[in-house]
Structures are given as C-alpha cells and as structure tokens.
C-alpha cells in the first residue's frame, strides 16, 4: 500500500514511520510530507533516506492512505483535499474529532464502525485513548457512571519545541523560545491547551467529550484536570471510576489482564506499577495501583500510563490503517 505521512518531520510523524516499520505494515511506497520549509530534507524509513515532498505532490501520487499529524489548521485545510482525491485520511489532530459526520476511532473499541465511505477518520487525543482502552472493558461489565481523572502529561505531547525547552532549561539555558508560559523543568503546569469560558482547558474537555463519543455512551460523566509535568516518556493518569454495578477487585484485574492492548502492572509491594520511563517506546497501555475507593461504594481507583507518541498517537493511527487494510476499506467504493 502507498502511504503518505503528513507531518513526517515532526515528533509524532517520526514515530509513525517507526511504528509502520516495526509492525511490518505492507508499505509499497512511503511519501514523507511536511511544510514547504522542509521540502527536500530527508527522513529515514526502513534504513532508506526518503526526500520530503509538499502536499500537492503527495496528492498527485495518490496514496491509498494519508496519516496526518501536522496540527489542526493543516488538517482542516488539507484533509478534505486528500479525501476528495479518494485518499483515506487518518487524522491525529483535534480538527475533525467532534464532527458528527466523522468517526473517532480506537481500534480495540470501535473500528468495527468503519466503512469504505469514511474518507476522514479522526484519531482521538492521547490522554483520552489510554483512558478509554482501560475504561471500555470495565464499562461492558459494570457500566461506568462517572470518571474523575487527573493527568500528568509528558512534554512530548506539545511537540519538538517543547522537548527542546525542557532540556535547555535543564542545562541552565532559559533563553530559548518558550512553548509554555512558564518554566517546565522542576515545575508542574495545570494548563494544557487553551482555557475555555467554563474554566476548563480544551484538553480537559477533550477527555470529557471524546470519551462519550468513542464509547458510544453520552451518559458517562467525565471530569478532568490535565497537568503538564517535566517528563518525556508518556502520559500518566490517576483515574477514579464510579460504576452502576458492584464489582469484584480480582475480577477487575482479570478483565484488565485479558483486555486487548492493556498490560497489567500491579504489584505495589514489589514497587511494580506503570511509569513513563517503562512505558516509553511501547505500544500498549499499562495499568496498576488498582484498588477500591473506600470513600464511596462501587468506585475504583487506578493508575494508567502509556507512551503518548505511541498508543496516544502513532500506534493508534497505524492500527486504524491496519484495520482498513485487513478489511479492504480503502479506495473508491465499487458501484454495485
Ligand atoms: P515542518 O517540519 O516542515 O514544520 P511537531 O508537532 O513535532 O512540531 O511537528 C509538526 C509537523 O507538522 C512537522 O512535520 C511540520 O513540518 C508539519 N507541518 C506543519 N505545517 C504543515 C503544513 N502546512 N503542511 C504539511 N506539514 C506541516
Ligand atoms: C498534549 N494531548 O499532551 C496533547 C497533545 O488534541 O491531539 C495532543 C493534542 C491533540 O499536549
């Protein structure tokens, strides 16, 4: 399959190239696309140097799938151009996620909804993806009523410039262009994405709204506080889940140990629990610190960590591409 990666020079774009290679996605030709300022630069795919091209050239080359990770503005402008040319777009930005005509897909949960007519498919926000892969199997058994989540998010979620800011500050250089409004090294910022009129950030509302859409249940209440911390390996989340029905802790562990894409790391006495350092570079979502909330009935506490550039972005998009390829859902619909 001919695949375009739009945003191939970025942090997520680079990870998409790695994941396509690692998972042996059947790529016949890889088109590396970035902004005009990067045209002619090179990226590495399967040990080969690939020249970066502009989007017009990429559309003309007619890939079957274009995976976008080039920001919301670029997606809004360019995804329809690719889609009109019959190319299936899998988009990492927030541009199309809440559009009722677009599917918001986490393969372990709802890839079955995809059809050949879906030409722009939205990939959820990283902090939402890792939460719903854990919530969904529990929801099927006990029905989730309300979720209270606090996040501890990696600077890689903001892109290359943010990683540069963290390491420059760590080296004592505070003169570099600032991505965050404050120092991030040795600090914690309760501020991810922009603030909205209701006092929440856009990142917090993504967790609320995207969860309902992916899990197909508007009754699930989610309230979030999203926080940036000076780490690079992945996003961590302390999640409090209230269920409609009573649960058994051993059964919860059993369900999560069998859940697709989830790895249980829950042996606190041996200091075994998920951490960004150990989740870094992995495709799975890790869960631990599983315990009953003793302050009210039918409520669970747990801790979720995943590499936000992997399951939170690149891996999820490649899994969507794998599903499309496996079920022959790309290309123009055949007239019956
Ligand atoms: P470029 O490197 O040419 O700026 P990150 O989030 O890590 O900063 O990466 C953003 C990615 O999106 C980069 O690959 C960047 O390319 C790409 N990008 C930004 N604007 C456009 C655009 N208008 N068309 C294509 N790619 C773009
Ligand atoms: C962060 N979650 O960590 C963001 C990055 O809506 O795709 C991804 C933003 C998005 O900053």
Image (tube, rainbow, N blue to C red):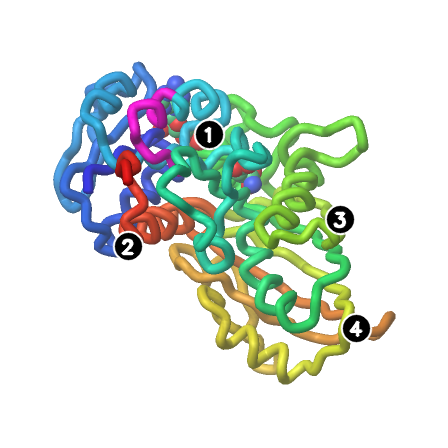
- Do residues under tags 3 and 1 come within 8 Å of each other at their CB atoms? no
Q: Is residue 210 magenta?
A: no
Asked whether the viewer can see residue 325, the reply is yes
Q: Residue at x 76, y 52 (%)?
A: 221
Secondary element at tag 3: strand
Q: Say which mark, if any, is on residue 223.
A: 3
Q: Say which mark, if any, is on residue 145.
A: none
What is the x, y in percent for residue 192? 64, 36
Q: Earlier in the sequence, mark 1 or mark 2?
A: 1
Q: Which residue position is annotated with label 1?
A: 161
Q: Which residue position is annotated with label 2?
A: 326
Instruction: Give the distance between the C-alpha atoms of the residues marked 4 and 3, in whole angstroms.
Output: 18 Å
Instruction: Give the distance between the C-alpha atoms of the residues marked 4 and 1, in whole angstroms.
Output: 43 Å
Instruction: Give the distance between the C-alpha atoms of the residues marked 1 and 2, in whole angstroms.
Output: 36 Å
- Asked whether, in this view, residue 166 is left or right of residue 118, the answer is right
Give the quarter of the image for residue 118.
Answer: top left
The span picked out in magenta is: 81-90
- Do residues under tags 4 and 3 come within 8 Å of each other at their CB atoms? no
- Do residues under tags 1 and 2 come within 8 Å of each other at their CB atoms? no
Secondary element at tag 1: helix
Q: Earlier in the sequence, mark 2 or mark 3?
A: 3
Q: Say which mark, if any, is on residue 298.
A: 4
Give the quarter of the image for residue 255.
Answer: bottom right
Q: Quadrant of the N terminus?
A: top left
Q: Which class describes the residues within 10 Å of circle 3: few (<14), some (14-19), or many (20+)?
A: some
Q: Earlier in the sequence, mark 3 or mark 1?
A: 1
């Amino acid at each position: 399959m001919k695949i375009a990666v739009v945003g191939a020079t970025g942090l997520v774009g680079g990870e998409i190239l790695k994941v396509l290679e690692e998972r042996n996605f059947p790529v016949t030709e890889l088109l590396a696309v970035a902004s005009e300022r990067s045209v002619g630069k090179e990226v590495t795919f399967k040990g080969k140097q690939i020249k970066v091209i502009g989007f017009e050239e990429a559309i003309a080359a007619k890939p079957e799938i274009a995976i976008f990770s080039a920001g919301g503005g670029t997606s809004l402008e360019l995804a329809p151009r690719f889609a009109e040319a019959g190319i299936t777009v899998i988009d990492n930005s927030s541009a199309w996620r809440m559009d009722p005509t677009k599917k918001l897909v986490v393969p372990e949960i709802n890839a079955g909804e995809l059809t050949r007519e879906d030409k722009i498919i939205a990939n959820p926000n990283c902090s939402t993806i890792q939460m719903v892969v854990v919530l969904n199997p529990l929801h099927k058994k006990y029905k989730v009523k309300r979720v209270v989540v606090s996040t501890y998010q990696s600077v890689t979620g903001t892109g290359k410039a943010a990683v540069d800011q963290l390491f420059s500050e760590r080296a004592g250089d505070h003169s570099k262009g600032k991505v965050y409004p404050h120092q991030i090294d040795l600090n914690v910022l309760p501020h991810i994405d922009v603030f909205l009129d209701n006092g929440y950030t856009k990142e917090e509302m993504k967790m609320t709204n995207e969860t309902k859409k992916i899990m197909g249940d508007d009754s699930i209440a989610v309230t979030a506080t999203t926080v940036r911390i000076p780490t690079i390996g992945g996003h961590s989340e302390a999640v409090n889940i209230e269920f409609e029905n009573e649960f058994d802790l051993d059964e919860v562990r059993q369900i999560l140990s069998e859940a697709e894409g989830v790895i249980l790391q829950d042996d606190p006495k041996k200091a075994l629990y998920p951490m960004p350092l150990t989740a870094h570079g992995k495709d799975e979502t890790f869960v631990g610190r599983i315990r009953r909330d003793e302050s009210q009935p039918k409520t669970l506490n747990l801790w979720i960590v995943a590499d936000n550039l992997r399951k939170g972005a690149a891996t999820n998009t490649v899994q969507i591409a794998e599903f499309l390829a496996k079920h022959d859902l790309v290309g123009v619909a055949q007239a019956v």
